Amino acid sequence: MRATLRWAHSDLRTHRGEALFLVLATVGIVTSLLLAAALFGYATNPWQRVFTQSRGAHVWIHTEPSAKVSDLARLDGVEAVAGPYPTASATVTSRGSRASVELRGTTEQPAIGRPLLTSGRWLDPATPDGVVLEKSLARALLAEPGDALTLSGGAGPLTVLGIADSAEPQYRRGERSGVVWALPSAVPHAGSEGQVIGLRLTDPEDTDYAVQRAVTVLGAGAVGEVSTWRQAQSEAQGDDRLLGQILGLFGLGALVAAGLAVHGAIGTRIRGHLRDISVLKAIGFTPGQVVRVFLLQHLAYALLGAVAAATLTQALGSRMPGRLGDAVAMWQGLPGHAVTLVAVPVGVVLFIAATTGLAAWRAGRVPPVPVPRTAAPAAGRLSGPARRALGLRLPPALVLGWHKAFTRRARSLATIARLALPLLLIVVAMSAWTTIDRFHSRPEQMGLAAALTVRADDALSDPATRTLLARSPEVAAVYPGVEVAALVPGQTATIALRGLGTREDPYPYTLAEGRLAHGFDEAVAGQGLLDLLDVRVGDWVRMTVSGRPQILHIVGRSIEPENAGRVISTSLDTLQENDPTLRPMLYQIRLRAGAEPHQVATDLAASAGRGQLDVHVVANPADGLPPLRAVVVGLLGVLALIGLVDLLTAIGGSVREGERDLLALKAIGLSPRQITAITVTATGCTALAAVVVATAVGLPLAHWLIDAQGRSSGIGAGIAHGPSLIMLSAFGAAAVLGALALAVLPAARASRRRFADTLSGVA
């Protein structure tokens, strides 16, 4: 045992840099996987915690005031009901921010779907104008307990008494109204009236059937909107789920790359230490002991890195800025946190141990007596192309370097594959970065042709509103439209039916499949709607809008970032043919190039005066992904570190294998500089081949992964964009030039070795 430890200590002193790289690579891999686990937990458990503590309703149904919702409590499978509560639509203003809200009348905190107060207090009859805001709405309005809200229609101000968490779908500007709990006396004074009831089911898996039964009992014409717990959970996961998936994917990819890097490092070290291994066996080491020396040595590196990563994540993870810190802090309080904190590092260590076992087993097969080295050149005979290249008087160093890089096919392909894997993942990360940037730089190509959404006061007519909007020099086009909730076939869920633009001035949808809608009954749909209804482009769909049937022919698939892609869009003319009383309720504004949306929104709201226009910037899906940039940068660092380990291993192996040819090269008249150029050229050719393979495989893989994520989120395939040619060229040049620079120093040292040293190395 003492001899084993002394040899391991000597080897560590000789290869300190390589050992450090292996430890740091393991730290990066384990940290990525632990952060992925934290983000997955953060994506699902906060909503689940709120839903469980509040005894949330599995279904919320908005109906007309006259609907007999009390009959729903007697349906099979309904455990309890929340409400019914009277509701009214309104617009509130706080600190210059406006939001559409649903005033919900109640006095006591309900037993089902109970709001969980996070600050302030509940409604009090002594404060008749007091309200409680849902948390996401309060965040959008920058409101706190004690603030005053201005209610549309000239009604008196409302006082914020408290802020509460809710398991219902959260407020989204321009898409979904926020919930405001108020005393029933305050509700009838604000806008259109209705009622809402929540159903808590005995079996959550029967949600679709329960919704269908409820709509049948009430009548389709009485139901305005239906939301389910699945929809709320999916929206609560949102961007955190995407971050967790990306971290998990790259963490696993980095784990495989690190395992291969360790395997290659051990294999190269064994080939370079055959004489040392023979000496170990000659002094009494058994094959099993030799295997354990190499295996335990690299297992110790992996264990050290895994323990360091787990310790750093546990101690400092909650202090990370932004969402990652919040995710780790919440994850540390979950019951399964300790198991994950141990299982992930142990899994990584075992995986690395498995990948190093084969290379260590090869060390045990080395004979105790060194086998005389063959007199043939290490790279074998010159190939036909190499001889022809020398005949063309190309520099011998370049020809011999190229020949050295690709002659040993099995070993060369293995080295290229190890180098290509981290480079491939870097190409995928660059593609993800480019796609996110495209949402900001080219929003019209990502389904965001309009920059602003405007809702006008009822006192403004349609022509007056258009004239007011077109007056701004920054406005390029105005598209009137409506958006209503529609019941899908089977009446199990609601979707967004949108009518934008006219046939003379159609809305510029971004199509990924099919064509634009031109006919009277034609429409385009998002991926989420196609998946929900199990239809495709070319099919006809029937839906119910306020009791009226609407049949549309889907002629194209549009990229839809809103409402999880559950949107079907046609022209305003088509909807007005089915309902002549329909009038524009919103306007989508396309701005001129270079216009600042927030500034234009402020100018339009100020020019209208007296709150006649509610103007807000269209939400961009990429706005919720700022942490992804930091994640991508960290992943690039980890992958670059793994690639560096692979590259140093390849350079070390190339230098060691070139020692046997050193005398022959000097004998034929090559100078030390030319001999150095051979090794540098071989390294550069290997790196160039790895870059080509990584780019050729990485770009299609990145497109497939990004489009698959877009499809699963409802936005739809067709959003993926690869890096520009300039960026790819810079990436390839940096990789090749970096490999050349790293190879210069060890190759130069080897080429200047003395003849006596060289003879001892080949003896």
Image: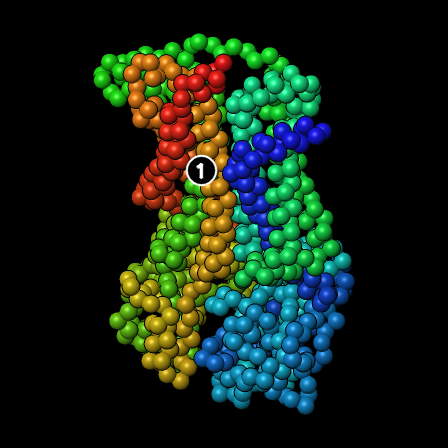
Pinpoint residue 325: horizontal percent, then vertical percent.
58, 60
Q: Residue at x 62, y 85 (%)?
A: 130
Q: Inspect this view and state whether residue 679 appears.
A: no
Question: Does 504 sit above or below residue 302?
Answer: below
Which of 534/352 is in front? 352
Q: Residue at the left extreme?
A: 392
Q: Residue at x 62, y 53 (%)?
A: 313
Q: Residue at x 55, y 64 (%)?
A: 547
Other-residue count near label 1 (Cα within 10 Å), few / some / many at <14 / 14–19 / ≥20: many
Q: Quadrant of residue 87?
A: bottom right
- In the displayed structure image, the side of residue 470 where residue 551 appears, left or right: right
Q: Residue at x 49, y 87 (%)?
A: 154
- Residue named by callout 1: 423
Q: Quadrant of residue 751?
A: top left
- In the displayed structure image, the side of residue 675 where residue 523 appears, left or right: right
Question: Does 449 sit above or below residue 399?
Answer: below
Pinpoint residue 270: horizontal percent, then vertical percent.
56, 23
Pinpoint residue 761: horizontal percent, then vertical percent.
48, 19
- In the displayed structure image, the side of residue 564 where residue 105 appears, left or right: right
Q: Inspect this view and state whether residue 7 appears.
A: yes
Pinpoint residue 245: horizontal percent, then vertical percent.
56, 48
Q: Say which amino acid is labelled 1.
A: Leu
Question: Does 500 sit above or below residue 362?
Answer: below
